[in-house]
Image (cartoon, rainbow, N blue to C red):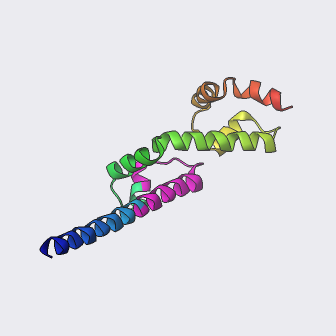
Amino acid sequence: MLRHKKSLLLDCHSDSQIADSKNLLDEKSTYIQEIAYYVQEHFNHKIQLEDIAQELNISKSYLVHLFKEFTGYTIMEYLMQYRLTQFLNLLKMYPNATIKQLCSECGFESEAHFSSFFKKHIGSSPSEYRKTLL
């Protein structure tokens, strides 16, 4: 009988640990969603990790670790990819806008840096890519 009570106690303890783990996972998932939302809302401005951490009321190191753990990307990699996606969308919507205008609209501070990033990820320069859309 004593063995049975001990087993029940362990079972209850395990259920409690599972619930705690699920709550922690839910909390982490919520943070990831909030980080992504912050990036999507502020992508066209200068974003610093400290700003996001302060907005979510968590430490910068926890923010960085958590996002990388769940997504496999750094927050800055995610930000740059999101900006690139927005640039591509704007380029299709406003084919007559200058590359400089569009990259500025998407938060890229340097046209030269943007062009290098674009070529690395798309395989051509922004101007060459624009020609394929026409």
Q: Residue 54 in the image: x percent, y percent?
A: 39, 59
Quadrant occupied by the C terminus: top right
Secondary structure mostly seen in the magenta stretch: helix
Q: Is residue 68 above or below residue 57?
A: above
Residue at position x 35%, y 59% in the image = 58
Query: Looking at the image, how many numbered discs can be counted on the residues?
Result: 0
Q: Is residue 34 left or right of residue 90?
A: left
Q: Is residue 125 above or below residue 62?
A: above
Quarter where residue 83 is shown: top right
In the image, 5 versus 19, the foreground residue is 5
Residue at position x 58%, y 40% in the image = 81
Quarter where residue 95 is shown: top right
Quick one: which residue is furthest to the front in this view? Answer: 1
Q: Residue 77 in the image: x percent, y percent?
A: 51, 39
In the image, 115 versus 3, the foreground residue is 3
Q: Is residue 51 above or below residue 104?
A: below
Residue at position x 58%, y 33% in the image = 110
Q: Which contiguous range is marked in magenta?
A: 26-52
Q: Is residue 94 left or right of residue 39?
A: right
Q: Residue 32 in the image: x percent, y percent?
A: 47, 55
Q: Is residue 114 left or right of residue 126?
A: left
Quadrant occupied by the N terminus: bottom left
Quarter where residue 89 is shown: top right
User: Within the magenta stretch, is there residue 39?
Assistant: yes
Q: Is residue 106 left or right of residue 31?
A: right
Q: Residue 42 in the image: x percent, y percent?
A: 56, 53
Residue at position x 69%, y 23% in the image = 124
Quick one: which residue is furthest to the right in this view? Answer: 134
